[in-house]
Image (tube, rainbow, N blue to C red):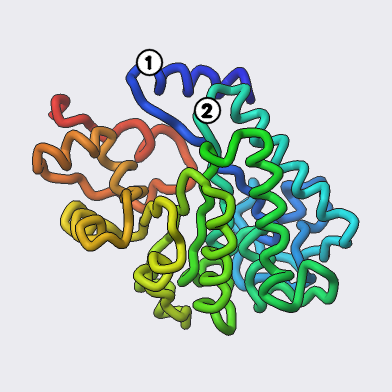
């Protein structure tokens, strides 16, 4: 994979761009079909509601295996090795994915973390794994080439917390000490609120976190310009709009019309909805 990704990073750099690799461990949002029949791992043996996409179609999530305390250092090492591979492949830095109900987020939240060791219970203990991962990855890349992604208001993948404002305020404060490249925050989405999530206001986190903030989550040009002008974020990340508009920056600069993505083509399949959206000059 390192050699394959070099083709991508070389192409990005040739065009004057920069590219970070997102380091991701899904934890309980996996399935034995992907792991030789073994159960996925998580902070606690609590199955998420919903289904996993497997090679044989959708299957119910299973009860994960709770990680033993002695196994957690291996998780940290996996993130560090991923960072090493990213640098070897030519990436300019890495983003630690601690959002959206995946493993690191599972450790943060009290709905999924029922541990009674040093990685569970208090807020200080629940953030311990993320801090260890940041330290290990920063030792490889340099902290100025590391970002962290959080979803304080997220409910995706059956995740929740009894006091997300306290939790993520603490996380943001702790991350200050690392002087990272940025903190990437997924803003409160209507879908999360409908599922009972408690919105953590961006302004609250902006007061706590002193570094660069990248915000995402349903933003368009107008909303993005506003959040930057108000001083609550330093940059805006786009996901779905970049799928359907491969030249999104040029379109935003020109005030050109944006093409809406087709959700039916997300998350798999062939080239349809992946490489067939036109550039402006191809119309």
Specify the quadrant of the image occupied by residue 226: bottom left
Residue at 52% across, 46% down: 180
Q: Earlier in the sequence, mark 2 or mark 1?
A: 1
**151 over 211 or under it: above or below:** below
Residue at point 64% right, 68% down?
108
Question: On residue 31, which mark appears?
Answer: none
Query: How many tags in the picture?
Result: 2
- What is the x, y in percent for residue 276? 31, 32
- Name the residue at the left extreme: 255
Residue at 67%, 56% (x, y): give it: 131
Would you say 165 lies left or right of 238 here? Answer: right
Marks 2 & 1, CB-CB < 8 Å contact? no
Q: CA distance from mark 2 to mark 1?
A: 13 Å
Helix, strand or loop under label 1: helix
Q: Residues within 10 Å of mark 2 (few under 14, many from 20)?
A: many
Q: Nearer the viewer, residue 233 or 218?
A: 233
Does residue 43 lie above or below 281 as drawn?
below
Identify the image quadrant of the C terminus: top left
Q: Position of residue 157 (x, y in %)?
A: 57, 66
> What residue is shown with label 1?
14
Q: Which residue in the structure is indicated by mark 2? A: 91
Residue 86 can be seen in this image: yes
**Residue 116 in the figure: left or right of residue 271:** right
For label 2, the SS is loop
Whether residue 189 is visible to the viewer of this picture, yes or no, is no
Query: Where's residue 182, x and y in %?
Result: 46, 48
Front residue of this view, candidates 135 and 273: 135
Q: Within 10 angstroms of label 1, few (less than 14), some, or many (20 or more) residues?
A: few
Q: Which of the 4 image quarters holds residue 47?
A: bottom right
| Residue 7 in the image, given as x and y percentages of width and height | 50, 17
């Amino acid at each position: 994979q390192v050699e394959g990704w070099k083709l991508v990073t070389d192409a990005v750099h040739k065009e004057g761009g920069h590219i970070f690799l997102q380091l991701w461990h899904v934890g309980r949002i996996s399935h034995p079909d992907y792991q030789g029949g073994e159960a996925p791992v998580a902070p606690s043996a609590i199955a998420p509601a919903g289904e996993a996409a497997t090679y044989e179609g959708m299957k119910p999530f299973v009860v994960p295996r709770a990680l033993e305390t002695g196994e957690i250092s291996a998780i940290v090492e996996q993130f560090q090795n991923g960072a090493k591979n990213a640098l070897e492949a030519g990436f300019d830095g890495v983003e630690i994915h601690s959002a959206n109900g995946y493993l690191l987020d599972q450790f943060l939240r009290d709905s999924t973390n029922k541990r009674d060791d040093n990685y569970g219970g208090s807020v200080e203990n629940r953030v311990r794994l993320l801090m260890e991962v940041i330290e290990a990855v920063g030792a490889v890349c340099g902290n100025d080439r590391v970002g962290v992604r959080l979803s304080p208001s997220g409910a995706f993948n059956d995740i929740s917390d009894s006091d997300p404002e306290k939790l993520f305020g603490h996380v943001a404060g702790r991350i200050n000490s690392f002087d990272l490249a940025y903190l990437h925050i997924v803003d409160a989405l209507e879908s999360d609120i409908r599922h009972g999530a408690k919105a953590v206001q961006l302004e609250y986190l902006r007061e706590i976190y002193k570094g660069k903030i990248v915000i995402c989550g349903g933003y368009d040009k107008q909303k993005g310009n506003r959040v930057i002008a108000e001083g609550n974020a330093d940059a805006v990340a786009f996901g779905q709009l970049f799928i359907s508009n491969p030249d999104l920056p040029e379109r935003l600069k020109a005030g050109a019309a944006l093409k809406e993505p087709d959700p039916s083509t997300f998350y798999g399949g062939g080239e349809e909805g992946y490489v067939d959206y036109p550039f402006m000059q191809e119309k």
